[in-house]
Image (cartoon, helix red, strand yellow):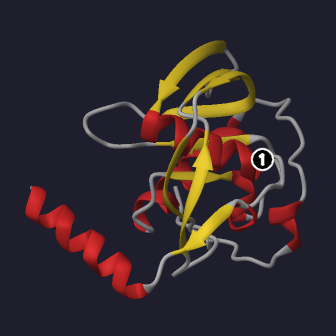
Amino acid sequence: MAIRKIVEHPSPILSRPARPVTDFGKGLQSLLDDMYETMIEADGIGIAAPQVNEGVRAAIVDLGEGQEPIWLINPEVVATGGTDTDVEGCLSFPGLYGEVERPYSVKVHAQDRDGSWYELEAEDYEARAILHEIDHLDGVLFDSKIIRILTEEELEEMAAEGEEEQ
């Protein structure tokens, strides 16, 4: 496993739709391991292959909290419901945070690391993270969805409030 360099905006690979994964062999497994290590090192909760300069439809979401990582290979959104606006950031946009409106719930059809198909339903923050990563695979960047950019002061206030709640 290796920590890879995270591709930052405006790299062209971030704006291109990724190609489907067809080979679930050692190369993909190595890529997924590298992506996971890179995401953890960067203190992220999700990462897509284009963010490590690989143009394939592979992404990971890991909210921690004792849950297993969600491996999203060739994911397709089957259904969405409701709407929610919350703050997002992105490893490819260091220092940029903004309010983004997304569906509150999502149903996804995807493949696991071994190529097995599965369906997943998620809500709230988990749905937001999954949709953010699927957008990466479609070449859609979160800065195009920002309703309002947050200032440094607002971010500091949010962080302080979060510490008080713990």
Please say if 5 is above or below 61.
Answer: below
Q: Quadrant of residue 5?
A: bottom right
Please say if 104 is above or below 17.
Answer: above
* Amino acid on which disc 1 is placed: Leu
Q: Nearer the viewer, residue 143 or 115?
A: 143
Point 29% across, 80% down: residue: 156
Left or right of 73: which side holds 38? left
Q: Give how far across and how far down residue 150 sits, in percent.
A: 49, 76
Left or right of 101: which side holds 110? right
Point 25% across, 71% down: residue: 159
Q: Quadrant of residue 114?
A: top right
Q: Give how far across and how far down residue 149 sits, in percent.
A: 56, 75
Point 73% across, 48% down: residue: 135
Q: Nearer the viewer, residue 77 or 3?
A: 77
- Residue 70 in view here: yes
Left or right of 87: which side holds 21? right
Q: Give how far across and how far down residue 59 sits, in percent.
A: 64, 43
Q: Nearer the viewer, residue 163 or 15?
A: 163
Point 74% across, 77% down: residue: 9
Residue tagged by mark 1? 137
Q: Secondary structure at mark 1?
A: helix
Q: Pick the quarter of the image with the C terminus.
A: bottom left
Q: Give how far across and how far down residue 112 sits, in percent.
A: 62, 24
